């Protein structure tokens, strides 16, 4: 059986994190996905200094809030401050990776849906993880494939 890469799974999760149905945490705005990696000739893409700094600061901020753990499939809701200078969808990867790294979710691939919205309440990203009960199915938001007449 193929083993997951070492980067997967909780790295900084405190032992015995309690299992909960939902978690909401406030995090600093991450760097845009366009600034997460820098490319080198020798090693290819490597984490940028801005991303490493954000991971460190956001990790401490997350741990201070003592979030529980949401196992299995989940929905991720991200409210990004309107003052953030990025495309709204560029915040999702860094936040998902951080939630996995700190054991709030088991694997960011378990996200069934990710919803993004702007907010004007404060200058932080509000990330809510809502677990899905066993066998729960979400109604599709949009068709999976275009109608046949649109393809012709």
Image (cartoon, rainbow, N blue to C red):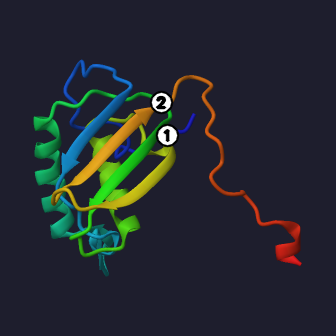
Q: Quadrant of the C terminus?
A: bottom right
For label 2, count other residues whose C-alpha is less than 10 Å away and answer few (under 14), some (14-19) or many (20+): some
Q: Is residue 118 above or below residue 69?
A: below
Kindly state the secondary structure of the residue where label 2 is placed.
Answer: loop
- Residue 4 or 17: which is nearer the viewer? 17
122 horizontally vs 126: left or right? left
- Residue 87: x and y in percent read 36, 73
Report helix, strand or loop for mark 1.
helix
Are the two marked residues, 2 and 1, in contact with CB atoms closer than 8 angstroms? yes
Please give the residue where the numbered disc 1 appears in the rendered image.
110
Residue at 39% of width from left, 48% of height from top?
A: 77
Above or below 113: residue 65:
above
- Kindly identify the residue that appears in the image at 38 percent across and 29 percent down: 70
- Left of 139 or right of it: where is 88? left
Between 105 and 144, the residue placed more toward the observer is: 144
- Determine whether, in the image, residue 56 is placed left or right of residue 88: left
Q: Residue 74: give x, y in percent of width and height.
A: 47, 37
Which residue is disc 2 drawn over? 72
Which residue shows up at 11% across the image and 44% down it?
60
- Height in image: 95 above or below 137? below
As drawn, the residue found furthest toward the bottom would be: 41
The CA distance from mark 2 to mark 1 is: 6 Å
Quarter of image, res 23: top left
Q: Position of residue 2 (x, y in %)?
A: 54, 39
Q: Can residue 29 be seen here?
A: yes
Count of marks overlaid on the render: 2
Label 2 vs 1, first from the N-terminus: 2
């Amino acid at each position: 059986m193929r083993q997951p890469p070492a980067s997967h799974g909780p790295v900084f999760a405190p032992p015995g994190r309690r299992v909960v149905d939902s978690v909401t945490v406030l995090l600093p705005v991450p760097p845009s996905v366009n600034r997460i990696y820098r490319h080198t000739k020798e090693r290819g893409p490597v984490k940028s200094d801005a991303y490493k700094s954000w991971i460190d600061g956001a990790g401490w901020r997350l741990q201070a809030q003592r979030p529980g753990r949401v196992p299995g499939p989940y929905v991720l809701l991200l409210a990004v401050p309107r003052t953030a200078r990025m495309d709204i969808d560029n915040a999702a990867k860094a936040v998902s990776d951080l939630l996995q790294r700190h054991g709030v979710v088991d694997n960011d691939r378990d996200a069934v849906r990710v919803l993004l919205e702007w907010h004007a309440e404060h200058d932080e990203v509000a990330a809510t993880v809502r677990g899905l009960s066993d066998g729960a199915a979400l109604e599709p938001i949009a068709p999976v494939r275009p109608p046949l007449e649109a393809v012709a």
